[in-house]
Image: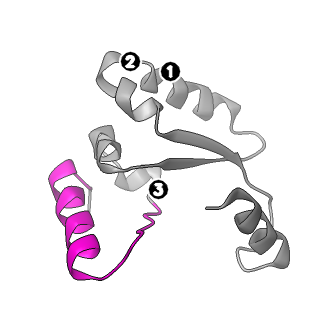
Amino acid sequence: RQLDIDNMTWLKEQLLIGGGYERVIFDIGAGALSDLNVLKVMDRIYVPVLEGDSVKLQAFRELLRSKEYIDVGSKVKYVSVPICHYASKVMMDFIEKEEI
């Protein structure tokens, strides 16, 4: 299913108001994101940067510089992610250091 801004706004509100959460992290792949306006709902946006992603990353940065998404660009933090298992000590140390 494709996410849209109305779905994401509703979900975020439900989790923050009714779920007793202080923070909610959404892991959204590009395939599920048909409308970048969904990112406007987010307070912070972490974009993982992996080796070899320079073309896709440059295209994303250029898109965020457009008038429509200029407010989204200020929320983005690019993070160089180590290539390792998600539950490894290396990853846990990285998460603590980055305060994600």
- Residue 44 in the image: above or below residue 67: below
Q: Position of residue 98 (x, y in %)?
A: 70, 57
Q: Residue at x 36, y 77 (%)?
A: 21
Horizontal side of residue 46 vs 66, given as left or right: right
Say few, some or many: other residues with alpha carbon within 10 Å of mark 3 (under 14 / 14 to 19 / 20 or more): few
Magenta stretch in the rendered image: 3-27
- Residue 41 in the image: above or below residue 64: below
Horizontal side of residue 84 vs 66, given as left or right: right
Q: Can you tell which of label 3 and label 2 is closer to the viewer?
A: 2
At mark 3, the secondary structure is loop
Say few, some or many: other residues with alpha carbon within 10 Å of mark 2 (under 14 / 14 to 19 / 20 or more): few
Q: Amino acid at mark 1?
A: Glu
Which quadrant is home to the N terminus?
bottom left
Q: Position of residue 37 (x, y in %)?
A: 28, 39
Q: Amino acid at mark 2?
A: Ser
Residue that carries the numbered disc 2 in the rendered image: 66
Query: First in sequence: mark 3 or mark 2?
Result: 3
Real-space Cα separation, disc 1 to disc 3, in angstroms: 19 Å
Q: Residue at x 45, y 19 (%)?
A: 65
Which quadrant is home to the C terminus?
bottom right
Residue that carries the numbered disc 3 in the rendered image: 29
Q: Amino acid at mark 3?
A: Gly
Q: Residue at x 35, y 49 (%)?
A: 33
Q: Position of residue 31 (x, y in %)?
A: 41, 52
Tell me the tag on residue 72.
Answer: none
Real-space Cα separation, disc 3 to disc 2, in angstroms: 21 Å
Q: Report if residue 88 lies within the magenta region.
A: no
Tell me the tag on residue 62.
Answer: 1
Are the residues flagged by discs 1 and 2 in contact, CB closer than 8 Å? Answer: yes
At mark 1, the secondary structure is helix
Are the residues flagged by discs 3 and 2 in contact, CB closer than 8 Å? Answer: no
